[in-house]
Each structure stands twice: as structure tokens, then as C-alpha cells.
């Protein structure tokens, strides 16, 4: 699905733009269709930059990116624009992922409008279908990002991303900015997308436990380079690179979310979710302490 | 005073000025340019603020003068905000060579003293209020380019703009739908403060004898009163009212601008700070 070869991106910073940061340095890997590659690494090692490069949201200094057999770095602007909806990104911070001046309805319908050929009614139908899918109710349609919680915003982001009907998604720490209870719900939605739509993922996280649950293979990044790639369990059981060992040993398996996932949510991931009555998942942070209650209650 | 009440007060006063400008001919029976009485009459029932050295009704001139001042201020400000928003956005969004050329040009223009430049250009182009507003708009606009440009530079790096690019939105759509609405609050505040500055500059030009001779304006009124005996004879009703009119309008715009500053969405600041 996606093949990357020698991908490099330098930034110039400092007072005179003289200091060179090799944010992504000679990175090569591939992801098969339907596969999820986890990407782990410390803060500032270049994960977000790599994600943006894959979608050509920023231009690389050098390297090759083949998406579904197409060398996307050699596409003309128009051809690239036509291909863009097939690859999407979920950004690190849900509060800044949506235009603050746009209501949810507008944000979610924008990709549908760009696709063209749909009537107003068809767009509205599709938007409400997507909203329901991600657990939002019609009352959220007219709200702007600052009128929604972080978790609700992340749901709007998911609906907007799904509206493009992507085959490949870069999920850049999609859970890190959220409450534990909301993390579990969003995690459930992502797993559902992976399973039901066979979407290929690059799943970026510094929480190894989540990566372990989500990924088929894991790549470890350190200072701009990928230092180790392998099947998830291999990486966790027999880490080879010192950086990988460090990361694996520092990941405590008794994290709150991991516990919750083990106890309850893994089953909701493999089971079809119950139809929701109100359709709204409450993002009340008060629930985050009582994980058991939250999982049993699920979406009210 | 809270920002909300400052905003309301400013809006109220500005509204009153606009009303006066539109309804001058209804409020006063005298043409501002007609010779309707004896020269230098004091305030009376027929001439509320008396007459000037030519026998023109001062109250009428005061009311009609609102038009020229408002037009110069608002038109100049509109032009300057349009110029700075358009150029600043394009410059920051495309970056590279375009940005380089624009930034350098602005740097050069910024070194020129704008009021003297305005004086020279006004004389050169013949002083009509539209020429004056146009010049102010363009000269003032170049100063605003930097501010808008830096705001857009941070917006371009915002996640939601990357997101818009990712769904296949074109440059025009990204600029008009995603960037511009987020620059608008800042542009509005700039507009109000620019309007205030240009009105004062317009009155200043009038006072210096560089105003549009075909219109009645407060600057020319003050100048006439000052040089033709109003000051020497202590005829306060001739000298003071236009001064008060300018000051009050300027205060109203300051209040409006102060009230609006809050409207620069705090959420926007957060999204821009990444
Ligand atoms: N636009 C930019 N200009 C200059 N330097 C940049 C830019 N974007 C990223 N960098 C630098 O590149 C490096 C990698 O940044 P990146 O955001 O990709 O890291 P990350 O792994 O996503 O970090 P985190 O875990 O904190 O999200 C950092 O040193 C960062 O300072
Ligand atoms: Mg990052």
C-alpha cells in the first residue's frame, strides 16, 4: 500500500537559519494494505514530521513515497489533489484539528462537497450517518470546536476523515490529549475503522501498550531514524535495539487505560457495538476514575 | 468600563454620527455653503452656533462636515485593511520568492515617513477626499501587511489547515474558508483603529489647507476660525464645536476598537500557538 525509501526532511532553525535539524533522516519502510504499523519513539524524534511527509502535507528534502503504486512526489498539483482524499491524517491535538470558525456540520460536509456530484440532501444524510457512526448526536451539528469537549472534537475529526473515505490513515497520537475514559471510546472507534473498512494505518504513539493492542507491526524511531521494525510481539518480547529495549521496559503494563482495555474494551472491539439509544457518548471526565462503570455503561 | 459596554458605547456614538451624516439636510434647513446671515453673528434661535466670517451657518457646516470625515476615515480604513489582508495572506501562504519580494518592499516602504509622504502625494494628485482616502488606504495598508502576514504564518502551520489540504481543498478554498475567517477578527480591530487614525489625519490635512476644497470638513472649519478672527475675538461657538466633534468621534472609535479586541477569539490564539 505504501512504500517509503530514503525519506528525509531537514529543517533549518536558529537565529540565522543555520542550525540544521534532521527531523526525518533516510527512513525506509512499507505498510501492506489493511495492515497497521505502529510508530513509537520519544518526544521530538520526528514522528509527526514523518506522518505529514507521507501525506505530502510538507515536502521532503529527498526520498521516495509510493502510494498504491503511484510515486506521489512526482505527481502534478492537480493529480495530487485528486489523490489526497485517499490518505488522511488524525492530528495530535483534537482542539486544533478543526477550524475554530466552522461548525461540525460544515467540517464534516466539506470533504463531501469537494468530492462533488452529491446533492444537498445526500450530503446531509451522509453527515448524519457519519455523526451517528462516531457517536455524536444531531445537537452537535451546529457547534463549533470550542463548544465541544476534546473527545467530541476528536469524534468530529474522525467523522470528517471518514467522509473522505480514506484507504490510509496516519493517526498521530490520536488518544494522548484525551481523558482515559474517552481514550477507550476513541480507541474503540479506530479499531472498528480498521476492522470494518480494512483501512491501512500508521499509528503513532508514545504509549506502547496502545500500540501493542492496535498494531500488526511496530517501527521504533529515534532521532529521525527508524532503528527497528518487526512484528509487534517480536518487538515486545525480543527488543534488539537498545532504544527499543529502553522503551519497552519503561512501558508499564498496568497503566489505567491498558487495564480497561484488557478488562472490557477489547471485547467491544471484536463485538459489533450495540445500537445507541441517545447516540451520545458522555465525555464527562468524572467517569475516568471508575473505569469499570464506564465500560459497562458504554455509550448511553 | 467593561469591554462589552465600551463596545456598545462606541457603537452607539458612531451610529449617531452616521445618522447625522445621512440626515444633515433634514436636521438643518441651511445649506452649509450658502450665505444665510450676517457675518460673525453669535448663537441665536435661527443660527444655533451663529455664523462665520462669510455669513454661513456654522451648525450646518458642523453637521455636513461629518460626511467628509466619516468618508475619509471609513473608506481609507477599508482600503488599507483590504490591501493588508490580501497581500499579507498571499505572502504568508505561498512563502518563497513571492513572500521575499513583498516583505522586502514593505521594509522599504516602512522607512518612509507616512504623514509627510501623504502631504506630498496629496498636493501632487490634487486633494479630493477620495484621492486622500485612497492614498491613506494604500500607505496604511502596507504597514498592516506585516501584522496580517505573521498571523497567517502561524495559521498555515495549524493542524486544521493541514487537514484542509489533506482532504484535497485547493489554495483558494484554504485561504478563503480556513485562513481568512480566522484573520477577520484581527482585521476588524485594525479597521477600527485605522479609521480613527485616518479621520484625525483627514482633519489635520484640512487644517493645513490640504483638504478637498469642494467639501465642508471640520479641519477646514477649525483652520478658518483660527485664521479669520474666531480665535482672536474669542468666538468659542465657531472654534470649539468642530474640535469636540472630532474628539468625540475619535473616542467612540477607540472604545469600539477596545471592545472588539476581546472578540479576537481566545480559542484562535490557542490554535495558533502550536
Ligand atoms: N516546521 C518546523 N520547523 C523547524 N523545526 C521543526 C519543524 N517541525 C518539526 N521540527 C523539528 O523536527 C523535530 C521532529 O519534530 P516532530 O514534531 O516530528 O517530533 P515528534 O516525534 O512528533 O514529537 P512529539 O512526540 O513531541 O510529538 C523536532 O526537533 C522539531 O523541533
Ligand atoms: Mg508529534
Image (tube, coloured by chain):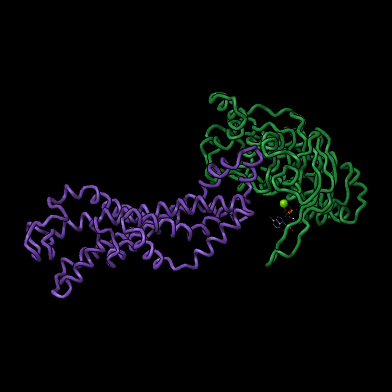
Chain colours: A green, B purple
At a point 68% along the width and 48% down the height, the residue shown is: A92
Specify the quadrant of the image occupied by residue B274: bottom right
Q: Is residue B94 left or right of residue B235?
A: right
Picture quarter with the C terminus of chain A: top right
Picture quarter with the N terminus of chain A: top right
Image vertical order of residue B109 relative to residue A245, above or below: below
Give the residue at the far front of this rendering.
Answer: B124
At a point 68% along the width and 67% down the height, the residue shown is: A15
At a point 93% along the width and 48% down the height, the residue shown is: A238
Specify the quadrant of the image occupied by residue B190: bottom left
| Nearer to me, A11 or B56 | B56
| Nearer to me, A43 or B112 | B112
Image vertical order of residue B220 relative to residue A95, above or below: below
Whether residue A283 is visible: yes
At a point 52% along the width and 54% down the height, the residue shown is: B266
Whether residue B6 is visible: no
| Nearer to me, B129 or B125 | B125
Q: Position of residue A128 (x, y in %)?
A: 58, 29
| Nearer to me, A103 or A17 | A17
Determine the quadrant in which ligand 1 lies.
bottom right
Q: Position of residue B32 (x, y in %)?
A: 16, 55
Image vertical order of residue A120 relative to residue A203, above or below: above
Number of labelled discs?
0
Q: Position of residue A162 (x, y in %)?
A: 67, 33
Q: Position of residue A94 (x, y in %)?
A: 63, 46
Q: Is residue B196 left or right of residue B150?
A: left
Amino acid at each position: 500500500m505504501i512504500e517509503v525509501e530514503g525519506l528525509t526532511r531537514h529543517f533549518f532553525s536558529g537565529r540565522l537559519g543555520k542550525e540544521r535539524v534532521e527531523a526525518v533522516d533516510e527512513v525506509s519502510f512499507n505498510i501492506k494494505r489493511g495492515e497497521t504499523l505502529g510508530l513509537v519513539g520519544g518526544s521530538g524524534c520526528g514522528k509527526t514530521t514523518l506522518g505529514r511527509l507521507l501525506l505530502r502535507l510538507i515536502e521532503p528534502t529527498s526520498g521516495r513515497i509510493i502510494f498504491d503504486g503511484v510515486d506521489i512526489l512526482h505527481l502534478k498539483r492537480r493529480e495530487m489533489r485528486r489523490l489526497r482524499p485517499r490518505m488522511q491524517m488524525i492530528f495530535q491535538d483534537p482542539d486544533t484539528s478543526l477550524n475554530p470558525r466552522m461548525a461540525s456540520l460544515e467540517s464534516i460536509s466539506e470533504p463531501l462537497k469537494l468530492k462533488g456530484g452529491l446533492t444537498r440532501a445526500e450530503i446531509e444524510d451522509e453527515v448524519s450517518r457519519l455523526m451517528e457512526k462516531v457517536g455524536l448526536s444531531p445537537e452537535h451539528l451546529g457547534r463549533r470546536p470550542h463548544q465541544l469537549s476534546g473527545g467530541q472534537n476528536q469524534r468530529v475529526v474522525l467523522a470528517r476523515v471518514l467522509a473522505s473515505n480514506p484507504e490510509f490513515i496516519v493517526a498521530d497520537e490520536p488518544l494522548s490529549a484525551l481523558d482515559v475514559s474517552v481514550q477507550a471510546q476513541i480507541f474503540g472507534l479506530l479499531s472498528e475503522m480498521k476492522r470494518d473498512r480494512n483501512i491501512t494505518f500508521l499509528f503513532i504513539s508514545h504509549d506502547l501498550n496502545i500500540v501493542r493492542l492496535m498494531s500488526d507491526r511496530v517501527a521504533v524511531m529515534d532521532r529521525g531514524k527508524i532503528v527497528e521494525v518487526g512484528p509487534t510481539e517480536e518487538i515486545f518480547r525480543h527488543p534488539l535495539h537498545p532504544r527499543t529495549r529502553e522503551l519497552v521496559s519503561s512501558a508499564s503494563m498496568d497503566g489505567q487505560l491498558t487495564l480497561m482495555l484488557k478488562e472490557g474494551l477489547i471485547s467491544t472491539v471484536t463485538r459489533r457495538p450495540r445500537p445507541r439509544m441517545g447516540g451520545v457518548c458522555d465525555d464527562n471526565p468524572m467517569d475516568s476514575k471508575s473505569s469499570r462503570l464506564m465500560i459497562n455503561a458504554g455509550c448511553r | 468600563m467593561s469591554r462589552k459596554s465600551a463596545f456598545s458605547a462606541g457603537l452607539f456614538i458612531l451610529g449617531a454620527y452616521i445618522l447625522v451624516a445621512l440626515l444633515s439636510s433634514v436636521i438643518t434647513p441651511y445649506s452649509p455653503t450658502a450665505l444665510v446671515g450676517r457675518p460673525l453673528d453669535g448663537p441665536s434661535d435661527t443660527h444655533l452656533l451663529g455664523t462665520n466670517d462669510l455669513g454661513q451657518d456654522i451648525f450646518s457646516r458642523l453637521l455636513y462636515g461629518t460626511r467628509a470625515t466619516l468618508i475619509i476615515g471609513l473608506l481609507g480604513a477599508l482600503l488599507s485593511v483590504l490591501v493588508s489582508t490580501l497581500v499579507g495572506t498571499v505572502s504568508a501562504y505561498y512563502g518563497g520568492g513571492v513572500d521575499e519580494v513583498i516583505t522586502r518592499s514593505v521594509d522599504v516602504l516602512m522607512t518612509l515617513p507616512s504623514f509627510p509622504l501623504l502631504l506630498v502625494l496629496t498636493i501632487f494628485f490634487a486633494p479630493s477626499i477620495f484621492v486622500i482616502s485612497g492614498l491613506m488606504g494604500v500607505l496604511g495598508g502596507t504597514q498592516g501587511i506585516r501584522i496580517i502576514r505573521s498571523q497567517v504564518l502561524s495559521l498555515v502551520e495549524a493542524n486544521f489547515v493541514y487537514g484542509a489540504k489533506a482532504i484535497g481543498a485547493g489554495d483558494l478554498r484554504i485561504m478563503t474558508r480556513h485562513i481568512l475567517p480566522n484573520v477577520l477578527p484581527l482585521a476588524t480591530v485594525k479597521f477600527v483603529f485605522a479609521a480613527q487614525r485616518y479621520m484625525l489625519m483627514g482633519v489635520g490635512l484640512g487644517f493645513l489647507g490640504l483638504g478637498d476644497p469642494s467639501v465642508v470638513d471640520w479641519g477646514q472649519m477649525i483652520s478658518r476660525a483660527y485664521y479669520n478672527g474666531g480665535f482672536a475675538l474669542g468666538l468659542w461657538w465657531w472654534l470649539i464645536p468642530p474640535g469636540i466633534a472630532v474628539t468625540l468621534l475619535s473616542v467612540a472609535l477607540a472604545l469600539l476598537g477596545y471592545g472588539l479586541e476581546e472578540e479576537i477569539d481566545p480559542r484562535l490564539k490557542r490554535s495558533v500557538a502550536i
